[in-house]
Amino acid sequence: MRTGPGLETSLVRDCQLTLADDVSAASEACSGIQVLPSAAVIERYRCPRELVDVVSSGPLSSSGGFFRFGQNGICYGRSRAAVLSSRPNSKLYDATSDVAVENAKLLLPFNLKEVVDNLRLERYTNGEAAEGTLFRLCKKLYYRLRPFTNQMVRKQVQKFHARNWKKQSFPQWPIDTTVENVFETVLQMSMKASGQEKIPFVWFWPNGASGCLTMTHDVETSAGRDFCPTLMDVDEAFGIKAAFGIVPEERYEVPSGLLKSMRSRGFEVIVQDLNHDGRLFDDKQEFLRRAKRINQYGREFEATGFRAAVLYRKPEWYDALDFAFDMSFPNVAPLDPQQGGCCTVLPFFIGDMLEIPVTTVQDYTLFHVMNERSIELWKSQIDLVLKKNGLLSFIVHPDYTLQPDTLSVYKHLLRHLQGLRDKTPIWFALPSEINAWWRARNKMSVVKDGGSWRIVGEGSERALLAYAKNVDGKIVYELSPSARPQ
């Protein structure tokens, strides 16, 4: 990281600051540097603004591309880098060499918010437009022929689609934490630039939980629907409450008594698509028509969450959906029909909607594409997610746990999770509870209280103060000793 005052500055092109609880900082952002990425850091950590001073220095490239930011951070976006690549698997330029420090201020050679949004919202896939066109054509043909095929044929098609998945280097399988890595690198550099030893922030999960887990069951057929009461019994035997994704139309009848039973037993109902035909996002006008129906079912089912069939997604259309949260973004998806991944293990906002990403492999993929009947991959993903204090989000279908062998694997997973909870303070939560917490946390602040710090904001009684520390060039998190749960 080079230092020195010799950087030219320019007038601000965009002085908007997205941090709603600190609008006064917007005028400060107009002082001569292009943008103020501090807002992105503060939004993620909910830390005091006066302790983070990060800006973007221009001029940036007119178009985006891939570059590296540190050892574990592949980024996509505009940059001052001399060379941007159109592919993530080539030798990438490391933009850390273009980072500078000026008067204790960290100057980044890219727009942090833009780069993070490009990762979370999968905008990096725009660099492969030709492949996207081919994907859309194949997808349209597949779903037209799907009603005339059996499950064996569909498995072969899906295996063929995923045949080269091991060659894909980005997003990184089996868990991609690029967003976490980029934020931690920026925070570490900012602390070094300003001489900060540690920075207080609002811990990611309530009551000091080291991570979070949510279980979801997407119901695809009438057989799966009829198995739901049995699956609830299985979950309850292991102390789990899950959310059931219900398809409102065409697939099966949805008895109101079943939905009432789910809710009365402490489970949750979310709306899964409209009819699960795989074509929700094919056409904008058709999507808007379907979105009205989906929103109606949301009110009828008393559901605040949504998931698209097959994890198809188009976030630029999400404003037509009247739901508090979505669960359609995978962390990394080399084996899914729509590949990509949001590259993060924490929830994030898409406008007013909270995205609760899927961070583990689906049971269908594990059982029928990878032909696995063990939980070893799940265990590996669990360990990687918890290393980043992230969210463990599972999709296990009633339809694919009907058979004794697959149900046995699921019970093995639940037994492992139960043992993990006994040893580790993991928060087992419904998606709606995660949504409520993350919205509350997003409005909290850390303020000075004499010689220490405290958290203010509605719901702060569940929040714990934590510190990000710079240890040997890496960010290490620790809970405040006075805030640790007794």
Image (spheres, rainbow, N blue to C red):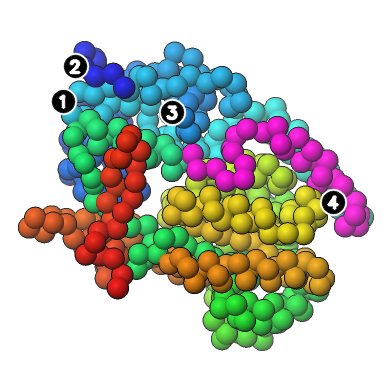
Task: Check contact, mark 3 vs mark 1: CB within 8 A.
Answer: no
Task: Name the residue beneath numbered marker 2.
Answer: 5
The one nearer the camera, 228 or 280, is: 228
Q: Amino acid at mark 2?
A: Pro
Identified by mark 4, the residue type is: Lys
Label 1: element kind = loop
**Whole-number angstrom distance, CA of label 3 to CA of label 4:** 38 Å
Q: Is residue 456 left or right of residue 391?
A: left
In the drawing, what numbered circle is on residue 69? Answer: 3
Report the Cα–Cα distance between label 4 and label 1.
59 Å
The kind of secondary structure element at disc 4 is: helix
Name the spot of residue 153 as percent of width and height, x first: 90, 51
User: Mark 3: few, some, or many residues within 10 Å (few <14, many ≥20)?
Assistant: many
Q: What's the residue at 54%, 59% (across, down)? A: 392
> Which three-letter amino acid code belongs to the residue tagged 3?
Phe
Q: Position of residue 429 (x, y in %)?
A: 49, 70
C-beta proximity under 8 Å, tags 4 and 2: no
- Provide residue 216's location: percent of width, then percent of height: 61, 66
Give the Cα separation between the discs numbered 4 and 2: 60 Å
For the residues labelled 3 and 2, the Cα–Cα distance comes to 22 Å
Q: Are marks 2 and 1 in contact (CB under 8 Å)?
A: yes
Helix, strand or loop status at disc 2: loop
Name above or below for residue 418 compared with residue 38: below
Residue 203 left/right relative to 418? left
Q: Is residue 479 visible?
A: yes
**Pointer 2 or 1: first along the chain:** 2
The numbered dot on residue 103 is 1
* Pointer 3 or 4: first along the chain: 3
Q: Residues within 10 Å of mark 2 (few under 14, many from 20)?
A: few
* Residue assigned mark 4: 155
Amino acid type at circle 1 is Asn
Please state the extent of the stretch shown in magenta in the rendering: 149-178
